[in-house]
Image (tube, rainbow, N blue to C red):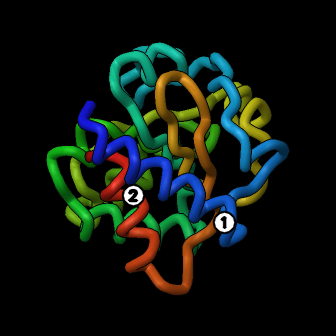
Amino acid sequence: MRTGHLNWRMVVAAVCAVVGLAAGPGAAERRPLPPFPLTMVDGTTTMSDAEAAAGTRLFVYLSPGHAGSDRLARLLKEWDSPALRAHTLVVLGRDMGNAREWIKAAGDDLQPLRFAVDTSGEGWRALHLTGAPHIVGVERGEVAWVVSGVLKTPGMLASIVKTWVQ
């Protein structure tokens, strides 16, 4: 990793904490990403820590059918890039059937990201998430920051997301 990218990531984390975008206990401080199971929409299983070790830098928690989550899903498509696709895992609630229906109904409105479901709710609880949507920035196996909700200025959120996955 180049030093310039590390500095930008530190700036992103600081902006999230200072502006009040971070949520949850200890969100301003880095903390280990808790290991929790996820089920990919194809039925295979994975663990959060294995995903982070494989290069996932953003865990995006959406609630299918929730207006804020649907808006964030559309924004992710607008921000499409090879880096975003390579380093993002979208977690769609706890109900696999609902997640699959939402993906099918959204069709071309979704970018080709990887989708999983937190069927047990362990990730939701371990990350201290409430409501939706959430974007969790992960680096070196640690939760660096959390953005809850969709900002009124999507450009600021776009900058945070794009910078983080570079």
Against 8, residue 154 (above or below) is: below
Against 42, residue 138 (above or below) is: below
Tell me the crowding category of disc 1: few under 14, some 14 to 19, or many 20 or more residues within 10 angstroms, Cα based. Answer: some
Give the CA separation, mark 1 to mark 2.
13 Å
Where on the picture, by quarter, is residue 148?
A: bottom right
Q: Residue furthest bottom?
A: 152
x and y percentages locating residue 51 in the rendered image: 43, 21
Which secondary structure, mark 1? loop
Q: Is residue 66 visible?
A: yes
**Which corner quadrant holds the N terminus?**
top left
Q: Residue at x 34, y 18 (%)?
A: 54
Side of 140 where 148 appears, left or right: right
Q: Residue at x 43, y 79 (%)?
A: 154
x and y percentages locating residue 96 in the rendered image: 53, 36
Foreground residue, 78 or 153? Answer: 153
Foreground residue, 37 or 150? Answer: 150
Which secondary structure, mark 2? helix
The residue at which mark 2 appears reads as: 161
Amino acid type, callout 1: Leu
x and y percentages locating residue 39 in the rendered image: 50, 23
Task: Return the disc, 1 or 2, that comes first in the chain's sequence.
Answer: 1
Foreground residue, 16 or 34? Answer: 16
The residue at which mark 1 appears reads as: 21
Amino acid type, callout 2: Val
Q: Is residue 133 visible?
A: no
Q: Residue furthest left?
A: 82
Where on the picture, by quarter, is residue 3?
A: top left
Tell me the crowding category of disc 2: few under 14, some 14 to 19, or many 20 or more residues within 10 angstroms, Cα based. Answer: many
Q: Residue at x 51, y 44 (%)?
A: 137
Mark 1 and mark 2 residues within 8 Å of each other at the beta carbon: no
